[in-house]
Image: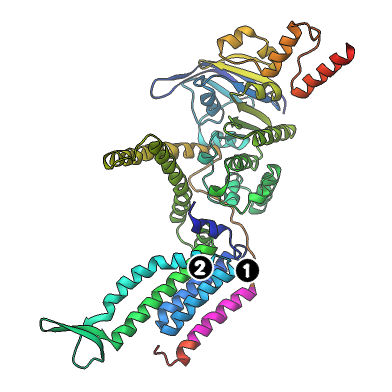
Amino acid sequence: MSGNIFEIQDLHFNYPDGTAALQGLSVSIERNKKIALLGSNGAGKSTFLLHLIGILKPDKGKVIFNGQELKYDRASLINLRNKVGYVFQDPDTQLFSASVWQEVSFGPMNLGLTNEEVENRVIKALLDTGASHLKDRATHFLSYGQKKLISIADILAMNPDMIIFDEPTASLDPKYTHRILDLLNDINERGISIIMATHDVDKAYQWADIIFVMKDGRIAKVGPPEEIFNDEHLIENTSLEKPLLLKIFQELQLGGYISQNITAPRNVNQLIKILHQNAVNQ
Amino acid sequence: MLPIERYAYCNSLRGMHPGEKFLFAVASMTTCLALNSLTVSGIVLLLMAGVTVRKGRIPLYFYIKLLSIPLFFFMAGTITIAINVIHSSDQVLWSWQWANLRFGITVESLLACAKLFLRSMATVSCLYFLSLTTPLIEIISILRKLKIPELFLELMSLIYRYLFILLEMAEKIYTSQSARQGYTCIKNSYRSMGLLASSLLMRSHQRSLDIYTSLEARGYNGTIKVLEQRYQLSKRNLLLIAGTELFLISVHYLNGGNL
């Protein structure tokens, strides 16, 4: 299917305590992209993401999923949640079963598949997340990183079209952070759209195809990473930080060490290559 | 983490069909309770301890420590049975006079006491075998096959999972309270304990809402359906269990059914 997976139009949402979390949020979410959602604490990132799986219902505005406006009846919600998965930030709120095997099987069982099919999906999801060896372990004996992997396997086993990650690398060590980001790339290469809320501008700059920046319950800007992080005005306004890599590169350019017409590197290796090239040229 | 839990997941009998372990424990327990014989109870106790320690590779020291927990409780309970009001016809081992009553230990009461004590220990050893070699999740799946109501089992498994989260939360709050001198004197301790309990309640409530959201996000519709793992039943083990129980029953009758 082509076109946008989601069209969000003018969402408004207030929490019962009066907090206006979303104030007219509109955005289109393209299919098969890696999207990073940036924004300070309290910008409404989680509130927005919970609207995408119909957990929260907007006070005003529309969520259009695959070209159809989302109705909040049982059947449409089930249909939506079968296609859009949500990996919660704290794996302990997501993992409800003491057995890893049963945990991962919960989602596919709800899809009404046969037991054989569910078993295949569980095995595949555990294999894809590199967590097959944890199959017989108890959930409460797993490390935080391992729990995170299982919470991703949970959703992968449902074969969704899109997965929402709420700060997937928060409180993970560098090794697990890498592993999770690689995993997200693998998942995306299989044609699954990904949207990830994060505070890590360096990771977002390296990883994302598109960045959404949120401020005060609205989308402040949508664009490719280069464009977002070159917008000094936006960075100032939304209290973002410029990625370290980009900052160094731009300082080098300003100082005249690197020619102005070289495009900015997206990762460390590209920067090193540019520096090598530069040294050779001189 | 609770050591019994750890052993339940990492013991050498983990791969054995949980149904077989369940059958072994329950059948031995029933035989032992039904026969009420000193020898059978003794054999069951030794057998269970042997299987748990040798086959399950549970450290002997830990096992003995675990058995000693009910030991004192049983001793206190059974000693009172050994001491009785004495009638003139009894074979008295030891006695004393109090007002116009005579209290003491008779051969019969001592035997009853020993039987009860050993029977209790043997039953406990059966339960220990099960809980040290079989994770609760597997015991629940056996109960499911035995057609225990689903609601009860769902509650059991959710409580089991969240028990650990609750303990962890409590431990974290306790640590953060102690770091701020929350338990330096009796007065502080009472106050901190109260705050701990109330914040635990609030957090559990919040957490239950979060969990509900996350279950809903995965298509929860009122019943928690999960896939049970499959295990291979072994004919050899089943025969071995049947053989053991038959052996226990025959020991009892060959013994004349008294001891």
Earlier-in-chain disc, 2 versus 1: 2
What segment carries the magenta color? B235-250
Q: Which residue is mark 2?
A: B129
Q: Amino acid at mark 2?
A: Phe
Task: Locate the C terminus of chain B and report the quarter of the image it occupies.
Answer: bottom left
Which one is in front, B47 or A167?
B47
Which one is in front, A139 or B218?
A139
Circle 2 crowding by C-alpha within 10 Å: few under 14, some 14–19, many from 20? many
Q: Which residue is mark 1?
A: B233
User: What's the residue at 48%, 80% (across, down)?
Assistant: B43
The stretch drawn in magenta includes residue B190: no
Element type where label 2 sits in the image: helix
Q: Amino acid at mark 1?
A: Leu
Q: Can residue A5 be seen by looking at this rendering?
A: no
Q: Chain of mark 2?
A: B
Residue placed furthest toward the right? A281
Circle 1 crowding by C-alpha within 10 Å: few under 14, some 14–19, many from 20? few
